[in-house]
Amino acid sequence: MNGVVIERMSTLEEACAADAVIVGSGIATREVVEDPAIMNILRGLDPSRRLIAAQCSGALVLARLGLLDSVPACTDLTTKPWVVAAGVEVLNQPFYAEDNIATAGGCLASHYLAAWIIARLVGDTAAEAALHYVAPVGEKEEYVERARRNITPYLPVVPPALV
């Protein structure tokens, strides 16, 4: 978009085997979901074996793969009608996760996806450290706290260790 080119670093098959996958957003998402070759490969995304997240129009990809059949989603305002038409309830909030699937709506909600994945794979401390690192100077504590408010309700509850 606007002349930005991103070179692939791995194949879609390799992505489907990763510990976590983020389906990004873009102006060609509606064409992607109509491409059987791409969608057949992406059917290998198994939320019982990995974390799967979608940013903005990436929610349309998850919807078309059937991964949001009983899961509400967050998406951007442009994509919302297409996700609703795919039979998915769209929430008016920046982030939502259920089990191993998460969605975020709005480009600036992407750090919620990153923090959720880091928290799930490495832990809360690592997620907070990553958020603090990228937060604007003078807003670090507020930035981290806002992210925590958005993702914590969707993190698994870990019982305290027995003493």
Image (spheres, rainbow, N blue to C red):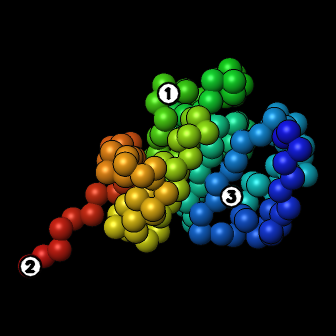
Tag of residue 163: 2
Determine whether, in the image, residue 60 is placed left or right of residue 9: left
Screen quadrant of the N terminus: top right
> CA–CA distance between discs 1 and 2?
40 Å
User: Is any part of residue 154 visible from this angle?
Assistant: no
Tag of residue 44: none
State the residue in front, 112 or 98.
Answer: 112
State the residue in front, 143 or 117.
Answer: 143
> Which amino acid is tagged 3?
Leu
Q: Tell which residue pokes out farthest to the bottom in this image.
A: 163
> Which amino acid is tagged 2?
Val
> CA–CA distance between discs 2 and 3?
39 Å
Tag of residue 45: 3
Q: Which residue is mark 1?
A: 91
Check the image and report above or below for 161 versus 153: below
Few, some or many residues within 10 Å of mark 2 (<14, 14–19, 20+)? few
Q: Which percent across, then down, holds residue 52?
A: 59, 55
Taking the spot 17% from the left edge, 74% from the top edge, the residue there is: 161
Taking the spot 69% from the left edge, 70% from the top edge, the residue there is: 17
Screen quadrant of the C terminus: bottom left
Taking the spot 59% from the left edge, 51% from the top edge, the residue there is: 53
Determine whether, in the image, residue 120 is placed left or right of residue 56: left
> CA–CA distance between discs 1 and 3?
23 Å
